[in-house]
């Protein structure tokens, strides 16, 4: 049986959401983005993220030169919750992103793209 050609992205489709998050954070910082992530903690009642307000807030906030992105990260087969979809709608397509491992080439392009806003002096 002949070996099937391997698409280099086939392997990225299987990375976890946590690994995708690490990749996005490190890449964003490499290209000068400020990054914020609210980390969940295990409690006696399970995993909790200490926030006040509506559930489902995007995983990351990225900001650089007046540009803000708010990506929700999912595994290749992961689905946003209803609360996450409500946030996506409220934030709008200018700021909100839903990124999966198969989006890595586009994610890298967006993060390295020069800002349309020059830094103020």
Image (tube, helix red, strand yellow):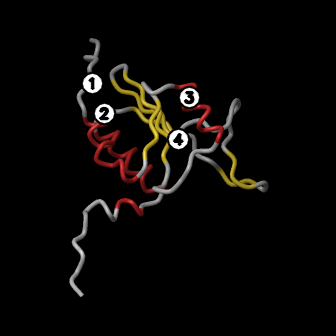
Q: Is residue 121 above or below residue 40?
A: above
Furthest-bottom residue in this view: 1
67 or 105: nearer the viewer? 105
Residue 109, percent across and down? Answer: 26, 39
Quarter location, residue 1: bottom left
Report how far apart the C-alphas of labels 3 and 4 lie in the structure. 15 Å
Q: Do callouts 2 and 3 mark residues in contact (Cβ within 8 Å)?
A: no
Nearer the viewer's eye, disc 2 or disc 3?
3
Quarter location, residue 90: top right
- Return the residue at label 4: 59
**Dot 2 lies on which element?**
loop
Report how far apart the C-alphas of labels 1 and 4 lie in the structure. 22 Å
Residue 112, percent across and down? Answer: 26, 36
- Return the residue at label 1: 115
Q: Is residue 102 above or below residue 57?
A: below
Q: Which mark is residue 89?
A: 3
Question: Is tag 1's residue or tag 4's residue first in the polypeptide sequence?
Answer: 4
């Amino acid at each position: 049986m002949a070996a099937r050609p391997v698409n280099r992205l086939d392997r990225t489709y299987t990375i976890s959401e946590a690994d995708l998050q690490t990749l996005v954070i490190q890449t964003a910082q490499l290209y000068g983005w400020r990054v914020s992530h609210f980390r969940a903690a295990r409690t006696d009642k399970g995993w909790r993220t200490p926030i006040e307000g509506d559930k489902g807030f995007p995983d990351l906030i990225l900001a650089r030169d007046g540009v803000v992105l708010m990506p929700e990260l999912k595994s290749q087969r992961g689905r946003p919750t209803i609360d996450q979809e409500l946030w996506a709608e409220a934030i709008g397509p200018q700021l909100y992103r839903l990124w999966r491992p198969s989006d890595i080439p586009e994610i890298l392009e967006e993060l390295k793209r020069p800002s349309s806003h020059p830094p103020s002096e």
